Image: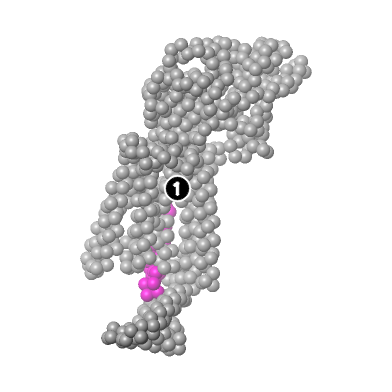
Amino acid sequence: MTQAIAPRARTLVLLFLAAVAALLVGAGPAAAHAALTGSDPAQGTVVDTAPTQVSLTFSEKVATTDGSLRVLDPKGKRVDTGKPANVSGTTYAVQLHAGLPDGTYTVTYQVVSEDSHPVSGAYTFSIGAPSRTSVPVSGQEVGGGVVGGLYGFGRYLSYAGYIVLVGGAAFVLACWPRGTSVRAVQRLVVSGWLALTAATLSLLLLRGSYTGSGKVADIFDLDLLGDVLQTKTGAALVSRLLLLAAAALFIAVLFGAYDKRDDEEKRDLTFGLAIGGAVVAAGLAASWAMAEHASTGLQPGIAMPVDVLHLFAVATWLGGLATLLVALYRAPADQPVEASAVRRFSTVAFGSVVTLVATGTYQSWRQLGSWSAFTDTRYGQLLLVKIGLVALLVGVASISRRWTGRLAGTGAPGARATVAAGVGAGVGGGGGKDPGTGTGTKQSKKQDAGKQGAARAGAGRGSGEEPGDAATGAVGTERAAQLARQRAAEDTARQKRLRDADPHRFGLRRSVLAEAGVAVVLLAVTTALTSTEPGRTEQDAKAATAASSSSSSGTGSSSGALTLDMPFDAGGTNGKGVVSVDLDPARAGGNEMHVYVTRPNGRAFDVPEVKVALTLESKSIGPLPVAPDHITTGHWSASGVQIPMAGEWKIAVTVRTSDIDQVTVSKNAQIG
């Protein structure tokens, strides 16, 4: 039964890694946190005279550079004058050259939101009359590609490293002080430190390319690195590296000097390590809080301490769980984790869960703002998944608590008997005795005899064997090495039998393994949440877009154009958006039609097919089909659209978002 655990564990690990990869891919470049809520000129509008500037309004403050906001003429030439300026609040404007000719202009933006995530997008407006444009705006989005994937993995690795480092150290200090001498536990905590350090360095190098060009070649650009160091995110990453240096000293004392102290000194040292470790752990958690979600939006002064507490509770729970799992599987037979240590961790884990529920409730309210955001936004949907995983984890943990109670119910004498058996096996290891038997096996006696013969052979050679005996000596040495390997394998098998001798301990190992598996997926979902636009922000952006649409819907510009905005939901992935129809001059006869498809956050959205049909129901005319040509990302156009007579026309647009998902939306408008 024990031998079956290894393949099961490998299968679980593969499944969890696949789930992690899927979640990280899902948290791609579209998960920006500053949404475009308005622009002047607005998307798709036709203005009579050339504007002097283009302004964009975002849902929060953003960081800009010289190329953050660009305006391109129909041939792709820049017509803006330089770096955008913050004109008011969250509105940024760039000046345009004077005397711009008529035609369709493309506005592109690439900025960094206040919570460190890159944002990009594009839209078009026209001066005088629309025209064809050669500007491609369907290229790679900022934060995507190879660099985006590496950055996402680095974020996951940094969270995992922090959890293992902090949770492992807390488990040893608070629950199992004897664990400081267990090599497997030492390696686990050190690996957490190494993972967090490597991930932080990687994020620092990747940051410039991640928020800029997205090119792999720019990862080692020192100029970009210098720019990153001047940002809030760069300062947070550097602070994290400095705190990791202090964490290295903490680890050295915990696993070095601690074991060499007597009981009284250990008590004093434990108190000092607990205080110092808590300060370092809180500082490391603050390096996330000061640069991401908690640092912007509603109540940042409260949100940042709550975020630190939340992350610390996660680390104490999940990191302690990982350490317990390692102790149950890898601790030597003569150093098993005691039932009392498991009970103490159970109490610590319960306190961590209570803290998580309290802080998580506040964070959910802060990031969502309404019950509908749970189902209407990606952030809310991911949060529901996280809540489900936490509930599952708590359920599995309750099973572990029952195993812990049974383990404690066997009594300390049973535990001491297990330890005594392990010590006896270790002391009597030279005789190769099996646990539960009082005599050594013949095989082990033969191995001892072989070892002694090999030793005598080695001694003989050392005292001056003849050269002719060299071959015999080599054979003896090889035989001794073979016997040593056999003895090591037997010792390993003996320790496994000792660990598995207690069925309660064996059951606890399996339930903790299941907990750890769920925790891996939970961590992936949490990482995806930190890269996803908060529900409150997404809904505010939708509201702003709807308000803008309602103010312009059904009204014409000074050139006589009619603009109709229609939200749609075709279902499936990326099924939601807004389709806008511009008809110029919106009267009987020939008309110019432009169709724009955008995502709910205002970004241009390419779909496989867009069709338009015009119907004058009062005169039983139509539907008259229109098949616009694809111009650029999210933009279709048709010229010479004939409207036979004036009246209240029904304009129906069919949007196909995939091979099987499509929807038709319509709106009535007075034409002519």
Q: Quadrant of residue 79?
A: top left
Kindly give the residue lying farthest to the right in the view shown: 620
- The residue positioned 66% from the left and 20% from the top of the image is 668
The answer to whether residue 530 is visible is no
Residue 499: x and y in percent read 44, 73
> Is 352 in the magenta?
yes
Boundaries of the magenta span: 331-355
Residue 9: x and y in percent read 51, 63
Instruction: Classify residue 642 as left or right of residue 210.
Output: right
Residue 222: x and y in percent read 33, 38
Q: Quadrant of residue 70?
A: top left
- Of residue 547 and residue 658, the one placed in the foreground of this image is 658
Quarter containing the C terminus: top right
Q: Which residue is mark 1?
A: 153
The answer to whether residue 273 is visible is yes
Q: Residues within 10 Å of mark 1 (few under 14, many from 20)?
A: many
* Residue type beneath disc 1: Phe
- The residue positioned 50% from the left and 22% from the top of the image is 76
- Of residue 441 and residue 79, the one placed in the foreground of this image is 79
- The residue positioned 50% from the left and 27% from the top of the image is 122
